Image: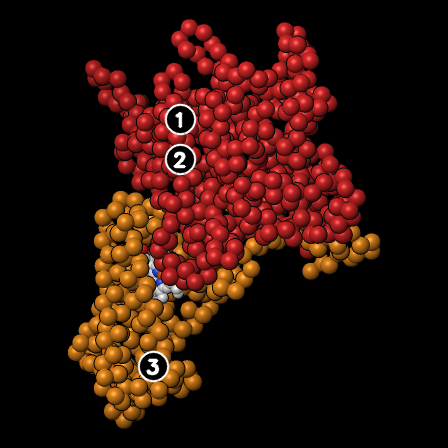
């Protein structure tokens, strides 16, 4: 047993209102520099939709993630030891600017400088890359709220799991259904980006599992951009280095939630430590698709188990980090309640950001006159829901729909139960029957309800103490650096000639 | 040489006995200084992200070509005897010469595409600096003279091994002997001088990317974890902080 700790995340999709506040918070702090204008370390997509960069989930196009080779060994789809030598000069799987979008601003001064005339002056858009006038053709959120569905939503790679009838149903006017899908780097346990880097510039921090790119070691070969199946590593065309979400580690180290978490209006985000057994990563990442969700959960160990605590201590994990793991909201969602699922686990990077799939208030249908519940049993029939379960199963279950059905059932039961408690128009016996059928106790239902609806800042973000101060003391005298800019490298971040 | 010194001798002395040392030492010192002080600037400075169509037809032939040729020069420099032995058979001589020539053509075609790309594509222009043009110009000159030499002074693989290699070794042993290069045709001299300029400018330009080729990848483990401290030590009472 090789116990390590990982700062992990849960996004509760039922609570996401698609306001993009998270994206803006991140952009303002990290990616408002030259060369990063097009990057959205945090972005919010409308699903169904093609996302950002366009169709990132389609690995036939982008070749991201791992694949099982003959003999069961995992290999990167985009690169490998033999291939890297030939692909260094031209990366065959590198997405280009147009796969994202060309960032732009407006010539605002034209509003003021325009000579007097009969027409309103306009601020024309100019490219933030070339500085020239452009016709805007795409943006990071071009298909927000299903706009342009025939071009975007209908090309969602996940729709391949659906029958033609289901697809037609999904896009029929007045039956449309969508939800939001906020995405950041998953800080994976088996990161494809790290494994792909020819220079060894990417690494996982041992203490908290944050995946980072060493800006000084990065030589701009762009392998990580191609290898990450979530397309969460980006190339800065100005500095010639790749960059990615850093999970706001300077904030985490000082006990603050990452900017996107902190600013989240819908309060959909949870952050906490998970302990896992690093010895089993390879074995778990190689399991068959339909076992992956459970296997991933197996990898995460119980922070209350004395054997785990002992192993963690032996590995040098601090007691307060272990205590933090015991209070982790992520542990509850993922492991105890089993209602948070990893996105596209079939890419086999073992992402450590989990999603509570959305219920979508479309369990009933409208035939023009009456709203009907389409089921006789306690539960509505999830398989007849307007958002086909296969769709969510493709996103969050690697095709194993039963994982999603379990979550939806539990959430539905809790809603009914809470309605029985607060409104009282539902029979309590009926509600408790639903809970039983959904593998949930009254106590658990209350706990889930609390952490979902009434959670405070401290409930949502249980940030482990970093103890970085001790690390610094080991290598340098902190007083020596007093009043200077920091302990990192202090070189000007400037493009070479 | 002392008796009938004329201006041409000084000329030769400067280009073939002084310049190489200036170039070599600048190369060594600046490369190291840049690596330690401004290591951040070591990057391929790729522009594939901005322009991805012509890119392939420029960068790929160029690099395959230039690396083949560099390797060829290196062989002639390190194992001249074996090269001469190989060339003793006309068929093998032809194989070697044709391979080298094709390498040169690849490099040239690649370079031309690189130039076109940087002139025409508005996005590629954004990341084109003066230094890039200097590098590209010298490379064009280098490859151009190289190809002309191959055409007009053929069997270079043999005479390089026989005459240029001893000259290089004389430079490296700090007893420069320009007797080998002085009588060379002008084109060959230009080719050598331009090579020295390449070496001289190398550490100041993007060419440094060729020095940081990622060899450890081939034998390292896929996953990398960095620990900031050995926490076992930190938990040991009495552990002493090491001050530098
Ligand atoms: C040793 C292995 C080498 C590797 C792995 C390598 C790799 C690269 C890469 C990745 C780029 C950026 C291409 C892009 O825009 O995406 C590049 C550009 C370039 N390389 Fe190399 N290179 C190598 C050797 C060399 C050598 C020996 C030379 C010449 C002496 C050279 C000259 C150049 C030049 C001039 C460019 C810029 C091309 C342009 O203007 O777009 N490279 N190289
Ligand atoms: S999502 Fe995973 S593979 Fe992608 S950048 Fe993050 S750690 Fe790397």
* Secondary structure of the residue carrying numbered label 2: helix
Task: Give percent across and percent down for residue A158.
Answer: 43, 34
* Picture quadrant where residue A439 is located: top right
The colour with which the image depicts chain A is: red
**Do the residues under discs 3 and 2 have CB atoms within 8 angstroms?**
no
The colour with which the image depicts chain B is: orange
Q: Which residue position is annotated with label 3?
A: B76
Q: Which residue position is annotated with label 2?
A: A160
Task: Give percent across and percent down for residue A269.
Answer: 59, 29
Q: Residues within 10 Å of mark 2 (few under 14, many from 20)?
A: few
Q: Are marks 3 and 2 on the same chain?
A: no
Q: Is residue A151 above or below residue A471?
A: above
Instruction: Name the residue at 38% across, 37% down.
Output: A54
Q: Which residue position is annotated with label 1?
A: A166
Chain under label 2? Answer: A
Residue B33 shows in this picture: no
Task: Give percent across and percent down for residue A53.
Answer: 40, 38
Q: Is residue B171 above or below residue A462?
A: below
**Gap in angstroms between the C-alphas marked 3 and 2:** 58 Å
Residue farthest to the front, as pictured:
A376
Residue farthest to the right, as pictured:
B237
Disc 1: residue Cβ within 8 A of ligand 2's nearest atom: no
Residue nearest the observer in this picture, A34 or A331? A331
Instruction: Name the residue at 27% across, 33% down.
Output: A133
* Secondary structure of the residue carrying numbered label 3: helix
């Amino acid at each position: 047993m090789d116990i390590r700790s990982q700062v992990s995340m849960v996004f509760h999709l039922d609570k996401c209102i698609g306001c993009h506040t998270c994206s803006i918070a991140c952009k303002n702090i990290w990616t408002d520099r030259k060369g990063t204008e097009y990057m959205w370390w945090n972005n919010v997509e409308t699903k169904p939709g093609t996302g950002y960069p366009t169709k990132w989930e389609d690995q036939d196009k982008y070749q991201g993630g791992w694949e099982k080779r003959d003999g069961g060994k995992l290999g990167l789809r985009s690169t490998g030891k033999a291939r890297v030598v030939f692909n260094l000069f031209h990366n065959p799987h590198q997405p280009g600017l147009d796969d994202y979008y060309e960032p732009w601003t407006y010539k605002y001064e034209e509003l003021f400088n325009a000579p007097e005339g009969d027409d309103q002056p306009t601020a024309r858009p100019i490219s933030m890359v070339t500085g020239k006038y452009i016709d805007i053709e795409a943006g990071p959120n071009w298909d927000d709220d299903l706009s342009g569905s025939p071009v975007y939503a209908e090309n969602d790679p996940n729709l391949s799991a659906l029958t033609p009838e289901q697809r037609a149903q999904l896009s029929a006017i007045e039956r449309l259904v969508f939800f939001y899908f906020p995405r950041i780097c998953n800080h994976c346990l088996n990161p494809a980006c790290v494994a792909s880097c020819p220079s060894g510039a990417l690494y996982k921090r041992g203490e908290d599992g944050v995946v980072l790119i060493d800006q000084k070691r990065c030589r701009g070969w762009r392998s990580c951009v191609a290898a990450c199946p979530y397309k969460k590593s980006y190339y800065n065309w100005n500095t010639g280095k790749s960059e990615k979400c850093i999970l706001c580690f300077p904030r985490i180290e000082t006990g603050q939630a990452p900017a996107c978490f902190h600013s989240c209006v819908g309060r959909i985000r949870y952050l906490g430590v998970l302990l896992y057994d690093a010895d089993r990563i390879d074995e778990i990442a190689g399991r068959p698709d339909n076992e992956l969700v459970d296997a991933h959960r197996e990898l995460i160990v119980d922070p209350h188990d004395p054997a785990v605590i002992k192993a963690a201590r032996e590995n040098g994990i601090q007691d307060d980090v272990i205590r933090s793991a015991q209070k982790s909201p992520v542990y509850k969602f993922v492991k105890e309640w089993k209602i948070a699922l990893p996105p596209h686990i079939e890419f086999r990077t073992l992402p450590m950001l989990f999603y509570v799939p959305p219920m979508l208030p479309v369990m009933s249908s409208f035939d023009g006159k009456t709203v009907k519940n389409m089921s006789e049993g306690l539960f509505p029939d999830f398989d007849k829901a307007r958002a086909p379960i296969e769709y969510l199963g493709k996103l969050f279950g690697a095709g194993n729909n039963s994982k999603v059905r379990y979550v939806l059932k539990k959430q539905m039961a809790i809603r009914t139960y809470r309605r029985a408690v607060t409104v009282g128009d539902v029979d309590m016996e009926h509600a408790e029957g639903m809970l039983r059928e959904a593998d949930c106790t009254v106590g658990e239902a209350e706990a889930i309800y609390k952490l979902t609806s009434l959670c405070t800042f401290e409930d949502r973000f249980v940030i482990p103490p970093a103890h970085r101060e001790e690390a610094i003391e080991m290598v340098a005298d902190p007083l020596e650096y007093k009043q200077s800019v920091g302990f990192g490298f202090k070189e000007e971040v400037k493009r070479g000639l | 040489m002392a008796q009938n010194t004329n201006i041409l001798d000084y000329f030769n002395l400067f280009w073939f006995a002084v310049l190489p040392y200036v170039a070599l030492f600048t190369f060594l010192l600046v490369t190291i200084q840049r690596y330690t002080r401004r290591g951040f600037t070591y990057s391929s400075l790729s522009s594939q992200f901005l322009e991805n169509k012509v890119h392939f037809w420029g960068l790929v032939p160029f690099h395959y070509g230039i690396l083949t040729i560099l390797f060829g020069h290196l062989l002639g420099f390190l194992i001249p005897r074996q090269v001469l032995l190989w060339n003793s058979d006309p068929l093998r001589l032809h194989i070697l010469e044709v391979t080298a020539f094709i390498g040169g053509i690849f490099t040239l075609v690649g370079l031309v595409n690189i130039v076109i790309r940087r002139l025409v594509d508005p996005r590629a222009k954004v990341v084109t600096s003066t230094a890039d043009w200097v590098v590209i110009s010298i490379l064009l000159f280098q490859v151009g003279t190289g190809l002309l030499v191959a055409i007009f002074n053929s069997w270079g693989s043999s005479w390089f091994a026989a005459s240029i290699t001893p000259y290089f070794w004389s430079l490296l042993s700090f007893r420069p002997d320009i007797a080998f290069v002085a009588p060379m045709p002008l084109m060959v001299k230009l080719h050598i001088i331009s090579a020295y300029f390449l070496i001289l400018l190398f550490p100041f330009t993007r060419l440094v990317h060729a020095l940081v080729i990622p060899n450890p990848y081939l034998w390292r483990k896929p996953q990398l974890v960095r620990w900031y401290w050995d926490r076992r030590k930190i938990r040991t009472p009495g552990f002493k902080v090491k001050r530098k």
